[in-house]
Image (cartoon, coloured by chain):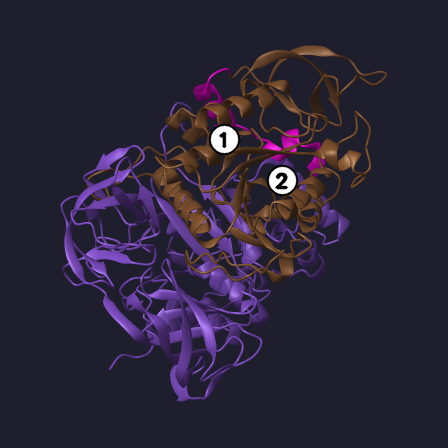
Chain colours: A brown, B purple
Amino acid sequence: MPSPNEQTTAVETTTRGAKTFNHLDLLESQAIFIMREVAAECERPVLLFSGGKDSAVLLHLAVKAFRPAGFPFPVMHVDTGHNFPEVLSFIDETITSLGERLIVAKVQDSIDKGRVADPGENGSRNRLQTTTLLDAITEHKFDAAFGGARRDEDKARAKERVLSFRDAFGQWEPRKQRPELWHLYQGKVLPGEHLRAFPLSDWTELDIWQYIARENIALPSIYYAHEREVVERDGMLLAVSQFVHPHEGEHVERLSVRFRTVGDATLTGAVRSTASTVEEVVEEVAGARVSERGATRGDDKFSETAMEDRKREGYF
Amino acid sequence: MSSTTHREETTDLLRFATVGSVDDGKSTLIGRLLVDTKQLFDDQLDAVTEASVRRGTGEVDLSFVTDGLRAEREQGITIDVAYRYAATPSRKFVIADCPGHVQYTRNMATGASTADLALVVIDAQSGMKEQTRRHCCIAALLGVSEFIVCVNKMDLIDWDAKRFDAVEADVRDLAAALGVKRVTVVPVSALLGDNVVEHGSTSPWYRGPTVLGALELAKAGDWAGDETGEGTTTRLPVQWVIRQVGERRSYAGMVAGAPLVAGQRVLVLPLGKETTVTEVSTYDGPLDSAAPGISVSVDLEHDFDVTRGDMIADVVNPPTVTSAIEATVCWFGAHPLKVGDRIRLKHTTHSTPARVTAIESVLKIDTLSLEPKEELEENEIGVVHLATATPLVVDDYSKNRITGSFVLIDEKDHTTLAAGLVGLPQILPQG
């Protein structure tokens, strides 16, 4: 059976003006337009950077939107403390080479201050990130936060505006979204409120990978096939690490895997893969039968509306 | 499908919105289209099946593919737009599945404002309803020039060709009155799938394309302006000033109307000074020309004081500079819009305080005529006059959807209260 992704394979092109522009050019232009609009309309934006592939694309688009000047906003990493080391070093190297300012908001600090309960070393910190993120937004008085979320990821995200309003409690109210007409993005909020801005709203997973291939965007090595020890749990392959220990009866295997998403290490599953180059990953993604989050994210499996529930609280 | 071409990139992008009354089957149709074209991943389809079982809907409820919010599934209605993505070998689709209820008109307008095409869904049993007319009217008003009309639930009327013909005649009359240029009418069963992706055997009397076939044949990507000559010449609303190395400044924005070409003679507005574009570029380097919808930065021969909110436009057929406009307004505010109201207006990249100087009329959906009225109530469409504190650089909406559109924003809480179109509604009988 063909994959949902496989169907984006046309080779036809049309000429619009002298240069030929394809759908990736249009998606890129739309994202750059959104970033410039938010930078112009909002007082204190911030770009959220997890080190994942979508935020790597977002950072690349910021370069294209604002260079040769510096970014008109800092970059912020919400650090769960449950990281893949490859991702942490990627974040540091990337931001250092760009010469931009990095703010790190740590879930551990929220735990130490008693803002959230410690789920223990092996418990998920996914949901705790919300408090850390909202506290950092309040502390720095950010009125807009760029995120790399895409509408094809989840049915609640499919409902969200490009500029998504958050009330003074950081909450998303899906029944009361602001109208968003044409490309007239409205960036003003009252003090204490903020916006989430999603320049990649209309991109699919395959668009992201095709763009990474075209633009030669660097990613953490765990996005490409490598051998590592994993255990199968709740239908997912979890990497054995200081945060994930095999339970009794679980069988540790050494497999060739890669990650389709990057999140809290206790909840982010790997997929079996031998795709070790970006071209091979594009091929693999194009043939996938299981969605990106379905294959890899334990955080979406808690209930039918897990993402909506977290988004209402102020999650990414 | 070839397995060696994934690195090649689809070119063509068609944006369409579903339009029609509540419960006529818009979300089910989109669900059917996505399932039958294999756009859904296995786990997504499993989740829809599981949710259907849990809610005891009997069959798999395909509307759950797009109705993803808790409240939507509880009530069995669509509250806000869901965006879904699909692709065939010939094009990529951005689908806005819009709500049908009148109280969510603002969300429907959100979905339709960027659409190239409307997928109109009508229940074959009841035919066109008031709300179908209203939504078709809003879509046409927003400049959607092509309709694919799905006469749905044909299985419930035993594929009665006469009934289909009657609904088709009604909808073609309406489309003609609204000035819609291209109309395809397809008899379908979204529930069973006939004529959605495959023809099926139930309607041998129907010789037209399937819904998917019609979507593949539709004209794509003209909403930002194209080269047909029907719209305006080149416009570049200035979004952002980029300081290059040294004293040089470039002006960033998205091209609208017609391609922007290096060497083009342009006006800087509202300043009114003429100059030449010395370079059109992106981060990747200079371009000879950039099409509508492409984000670029330009360098100008002269060092004028150009800032965000200004517009760079072709010297031939330039836009109008004015502080007083006549416009068509779709009002979404809970309180009526009245003469004298002060409001913030955002047009292209420019925001300005504005005041309502006159309300002329309201558009009657049933007769498609304008009737005198002194205020606009929620979800009404009317003709108003606005005066702005700083001048606007505008075109008629019928000529350019970018430079002819604006929104009205509450000055106190910054909520968007109206969609505005420069000029009279274009759907009215001309003359």
Q: Is residue A108 visible?
A: yes
- Return the residue nearer the eye: A28 or B33: A28
The dot on residue B44 is 2
Give the residue at x 56% y 64%. B24
| Quarter placement of the N terminus of chain B | top left
Which range is magenta?
Answer: A276-300
Residue B131 spot, x, y in % from top left: 52, 73
Q: Is residue B366 above or below residue B40?
A: below
Residue A294 placed where, x, y %?
64, 34
Taken as a whole, is the magenta stretch helix, strand or loop? helix
Q: Chain of mark 1?
A: A
Can you tell which mark lies on residue A56? Answer: 1
Q: Is residue B72 magenta?
A: no
Find residue A189 and report its horizontal and vertical position in percent: 55, 59
Instruction: Tell me the residue at 42%/58% (across/down).
Output: A184
Is the residue B73 above or below the residue A150 in the image?
A: below
Determine whether the residue tagged by mark 1 lies in a helix, strand or loop.
helix
Quick check: A103 left or right of B247? right
User: What crowding class fits label 1: few (fewer than 14 Cα within 10 Å), some (14-19), or many (20 or more)?
Assistant: many
